Amino acid sequence: MNSPFATHVAFTRLLCAAGQAPSVLNTQPWRIKAVRGEFAELLADPDRRLRVGDPRGRSLHVSCGAALFNLRLAVRTAGHRPLVWLLPNTAEEPRLLAAVRVSTSGPASWRTRDLYEGIGLRHTNREPFSEWRIPEHVLTDLRDAAAREGARLVVLGRRASAGLLECVAVADDELAGDAAYQAELRAWTMGGSRGEGLPTYVQGPACADDPAPVRDFGMHGGRGPVRFEPRPQLAVLTTAGDGPADWLRAGQALQRVLLTATVHGVSASFLNQPLDLRDMRGRRDPHHRDGHLQMIVRLGYGPPVPRAPRRPPAELKETGPA
């Protein structure tokens, strides 16, 4: 069976899948290179790193980890087994985050195919969710998805969710007074659509609730304020460590969780302001006994919404000496 990196058509399919991954402010901070048609390299795009909001590069690594998971799915559904090395040569090429080779394998399972089909359906949903609670068997599937990638998804109860929302509100207030952070945020939340960032049509309405269970980017297209679900269902994604390899694992776990949620019809959005503030100020809060927090996720059943724009596959392809 031919390598999925050997032909333009096959490699473009991989680029399309990887490019649909979620990323911080839809920056899409990745590039992918086919080397001699034998393996692929996932590289960070430093021009798309948030210099103010992501000084450690944590969010960039999580975003690239999500793209790596989509790449793995595309390889697997093409009839190959992906073999992944994280951070294979950081001394000589710090941009190189992962290398992916393939070995022969049989057809993908129906579960894997379902996840792959979910790539084009998954999107962040910043609308109000219904009051329907997510069934326990679905939550179990989401936890299992995170565990398969070496992370942990902790679904919070009512009291813990309320406390975390207060933490998000406090962080949001502090970040509102940081001029550099706000300027960077505005640069990626423009009103139009140019293949990147968060245009107005994906930002959702203004929220009438306090504390808000959704991030307000300040551009609502004249909508709102509206009421959101009274009991938001929150979860945190944690890892045992807090270094670049852990962040890449968190991104892969996040995307497996989100695609599993998509298969179950569950929507998601993010409330990562406390994590931005932690990274910017060198703080250790918010702390969780189950590990290092990498993502704060709101889960529920939301209405249909448009997807954020994506760059064309040709812009994701890294060129240069093989």
Image (cartoon, rainbow, N blue to C red):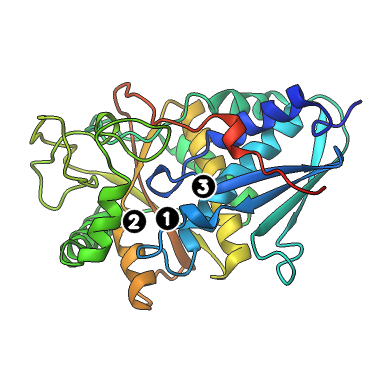
For marks 1 and 3 on the same chain, the one whose residue lies earlier in the sequence: 3
The residue beneath circle 2 is: 272
Is the Cβ of the residue at disc 1 closer than 8 Å to that at disc 2? Answer: yes
Q: Amino acid at mark 1?
A: Met
Query: What is the secondary structure assignment of the residue under circle 1?
Result: strand
- Reply above or below: 125 against 53: above
Displayed quadrant of residue 236: bottom left
Residue at the image position 27 percent from the left and 55 percent from the top: 161
Is the Cβ of the residue at disc 2 closer than 8 Å to that at disc 3? Answer: no
State the image coordinates of residue 44 (x, y, percent, origin top left): 59, 54
Residue 254 - label: 3
Left or right, 297 with respect to 148, comes to left
For marks 2 and 3 on the same chain, the one whose residue lies earlier in the sequence: 3
What is the number of callouts on the image? 3
State the image coordinates of residue 197 (x, y, percent, origin top left): 37, 40
Residue at the image position 68 percent from the left and 58 percent from the top: 96
Residue at the image position 31 percent from the left and 68 percent from the top: 277
Q: Amino acid at mark 2?
A: Asn
Is the Cβ of the residue at disc 1 closer than 8 Å to that at disc 3? Answer: yes
**Distance between mark 1 and mark 2 Cα atoms:** 6 Å
**Distance between mark 1 and mark 3 Cα atoms:** 8 Å
Query: What is the secondary structure assignment of the residue under circle 3?
Result: helix
**Distance between mark 2 and mark 3 Cα atoms:** 13 Å
